[in-house]
Amino acid sequence: MGSVAWKQLLLNALESNAHLKHSSFMQLATIGTNGTPSNRTVVFRGFQDNTDNIQINTDARTRKIEELKLCPSAEICWYFTDSWEQFRINGNVDIIDGSNAEPLKLEQRENSWFASSLRSRSQYLCPNPGLPCLHEQAQPDISLDPSTGPIDAFCLLILEPHQVDYLNLKSNQRLTFKSSVSAAAEKSWTVERVNP
Amino acid sequence: MGSVAWKQLLLNALESNAHLKHSSFMQLATIGTNGTPSNRTVVFRGFQDNTDNIQINTDARTRKIEELKLCPSAEICWYFTDSWEQFRINGNVDIIDGSNAEPLKLEQRENSWFASSLRSRSQYLCPNPGLPCLHEQAQPDISLDPSTGPIDAFCLLILEPHQVDYLNLKSNQRLTFKSSVSAAAEKSWTVERVNP
């Protein structure tokens, strides 16, 4: 069992929990700028084409961006409430914002922007997340043209997994998948059954 | 609004999501021994009496214990799927195992042990979590006397919150609670409304 195995387990879990709106919600842990852990819920935006890399959309003005710039390492914890399965996905995160120098990455960011709902896109026009809320200030009337491309605040994050820990609480089985990269830059996975 | 305020919001969330078995599941992020983030689901075991400290039971043989001994800082991310509320609770964790020198803490550990189901307690007799699973080895016949006190592998963790970030996705409101400790060692909380 290799890469396909954990990805397939994850695709199966997504399918068997698809009736739950929150099945695409996962918790992303990073290292805070003061060295303490940081943890928040984010939405799974699919795999990057033909890879096992995980896509997340976020706002460039959130604290996680500053944290990931200092330490790109992150761990996703994803618990599927209906099938009682947990995935812990550890890896490094690539931040793709509008200033990225690689045209292919900018294209991925644009694709991810247009794959989001107009409502999701409009959130990037809201006041700076995490800053004090000015009650006096009337909420701006937010409207975004559907053809408008990604705005500055929009960031695509790509997590490239290097270790995955899978736990099934129904069958009480646990598997650890570890990746390695060959001299020819080929990524491969090994799996081990471990005690739950 | 102070300590009571976020604790009350959390108690309300627990009540309005109580019909869901997974409402007591939260994600605990720590710093791995190699400096990368570590994240897993744990079960909320209530507040320590008359405090806002959060209780978690765990196995002394899990990786999180080693991690917390090196860096006691942790952040809980707790998403309530029915009421669309998220709590991010940051603080330091006190590890209470059987070797603890304080009788009051050993008593708390014992109380937490007996407050768990017999099935939960039996898990601490299982083979070392995270180690390779020996297929050849027959599963031991685990039976635990209900009157047996906490066994060595049983640890009580106490997270003492110092910052809480509350987000309500239905009302689109976000509050940040910060604690401070006075010269007389009195803990107090301030709250600020921030942009979601």
Image (spheres, coloured by chain):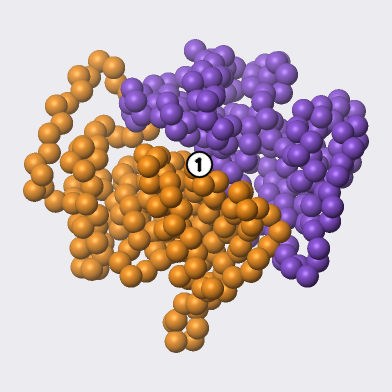
Chain colours: A purple, B orange
Question: Where is residue B72 drawn, in percent x and y?
Answer: 46, 58
Q: In front here: A13 or A106?
A: A13
- Please give left or right for residue A31 compared with residue B195 in the image: left
Reply above or below: A160 against A143.
Answer: above
Question: Where is residue B113 drawn, in percent x and y?
Answer: 21, 51
In which quadrant is the C terminus of chain A drawn?
Answer: top left
Q: Say whether residue A143 is visible.
A: yes
Question: Where is residue B42 drawn, in percent x and y?
Answer: 40, 44
- Please give left or right for residue B66 compared with residue A145 in the image: left
Question: Where is residue B76 drawn, in percent x and y?
Answer: 49, 52
Quadrant in which residue B156 is drawn: bottom left
Question: Residue placed at 56% from the left, 41% from the top?
Answer: A27
Q: Give the structural element (helix, strand or loop) at label 1.
A: loop
**Amino acid found under the numbered disc labelled 1:** Thr
Question: Residue placed at 39% from the left, 21% from the top?
Answer: A193
The chain identifier of the residue carrying mark 1 reads B
Category of crowding for the residue at label 1, using alpha-carbon neighbours closer than 10 angstroms: few (below 14), some (14–19), many (at least 20): some
Question: Residue placed at 49% from the left, 20% from the top?
Answer: A16
- Please give left or right for residue A164 compared with residue B141 in the image: right
- Please give left or right for residue B78 compared with residue A33 in the image: left
Question: Residue placed at 62% from the left, 53% from the top?
Answer: B171
Query: Residue under circle 1?
Result: B81
Reply above or below: A4 against A29.
Answer: above
